[in-house]
Image (tube, rainbow, N blue to C red):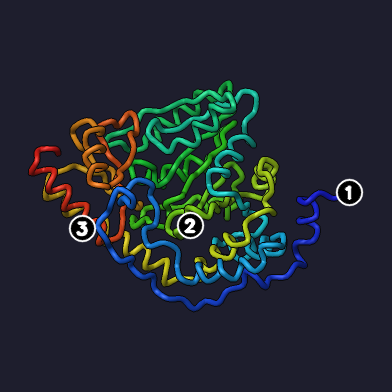
Amino acid sequence: MTLNRRQLFRLTGASLGTALVSAGSSAAFAEQPEFTAPTKQNPLLLSFNENPLGMSQKAKEAIARAALYGSRYPFQQVVQFKKDLAKFVGVTPDEVLLTHGSAEAIRATIEAYNLKNTVLVQPELTYGDGAMVAEHNGMPIKNVKMGPNWSVDLEALKKAAASEAKKHHIIVYLVNPNNPTSTIADCGFMIKWIKSQPKNTFFVLDEAYGEFVNDPSFKSGVELVKQGFDNLVVLKTFSKIFAMAGMRLGYAIGAVSVINKIRDHVAYEVMMNQSTLAAAMAEMNDKEFLAESKESNDKAREILYKALDELKIPYLPSQTNFVFIDLKAPLKPFFEHMKDENIMVGRPFPPALQWCRISLGTPAEMTYFVEKLKEFRKKGWI
């Protein structure tokens, strides 16, 4: 019998070595990058929700070591990394699937659960990858109106899904905390809804920003996976608090049956990048770096909040590394004025066409940004 790479991985994974991805638990605090005023060649990027601290020193050193193994396939590293990642999350390795960024996890999940009569149900103002995949696969999309202050109206979503489920299979796509609004949904309602196991309904919970949340009412869908529910998958990423957006590593967490189904729509889980795995391992073990990333983000958010309050610019309470602000005017002029100052802010997010998503930089970067906001007020631009 001829074995393909996926079968070989499953048969031999348990016995493979762990030398490359093993990393010590010692760590150093992340250093705040030295601030310099932005230029046209090096603008201030407050547009992509990245971690402005960059990867930890431990991660950079791990990447250098991993380069020595760049000629080797990463079979053993993938196996060991999944074990350590599963331990980090609190599930079993069979309940974890590695993907090339969370974007691949979104695509693979929706395609795995796309039957002939499937409808994607989602809030009308949310991250666009779910709808993009649905459109690519000819899947109808049911966009549900938002609640007050651009909140996710879970009651309306539930009613819409139940109505569609009478004739269709349903995928409910929920980003929590939501992007671009930066707020969290009613987690109690969400958990109860999923636990009710509605007919013909599968939930995709995108928790890319979960590590930034301060609100104690937030509950991750991972807890439902641990309890054995198989009508959901939780998607996570190393792009945000782990500062690895350019390294492309995401993962899905779900029941074994769910993960196996999604895996069939991933090209090669075993074919991950050596350097990415090594960096991710270092970041997971670097508790001080993760704590510093969150602390820096919280400080930057408070600097922005203070200026917005002073200028009486409305905003939504953020549980992420960005803030959604109400310009009370079309976004484009503000966007262009900021661009002229070598500052890049968020793109338009219909239907919230007078709102702007501001990614949080370092505290020093946000201090610079709010100075520009105040200058704009004096010029009558905001």
In primary-sequence order, the first of circles 3 and 1 is 1
Q: Which mark is residue 216?
A: none
Asked whether, in this view, residue 74 is left or right of residue 322, the answer is right
- The residue under the point 39% across, 30% down is 124
Mark 1 and mark 2: Cα distance apart in space: 37 Å
Q: Amino acid at mark 3?
A: Thr
* Residue drawn where x is 47% and y is 25% of the image: 142
Depth check, front residue: 259 or 164: 259
Say what secondary structure mark 2 lies in: loop
Residue occupying the point 33% across, 67% down: 32
- Look at the picture and state if 6 lies above or below 158: below
Query: Tag 2: residue type?
Result: Met
Depth-wise, is mark 3 or mark 1 nearer the camera?
A: 3
Single out the residue that lies furthest toward the right. 1
Q: Which residue is mark 3?
A: 367
C-alpha separation, residue under disc 2 versus residue under disc 3: 24 Å
**Residue carrying label 1:** 2
Q: Looking at this view, is 341 or 239 the one in front?
A: 341
Horizontal relation, residue 266 to residue 172: left or right: right
Which residue is identified by label 2?
244
> Which comes before the other along the chain, label 1 or label 2?
1
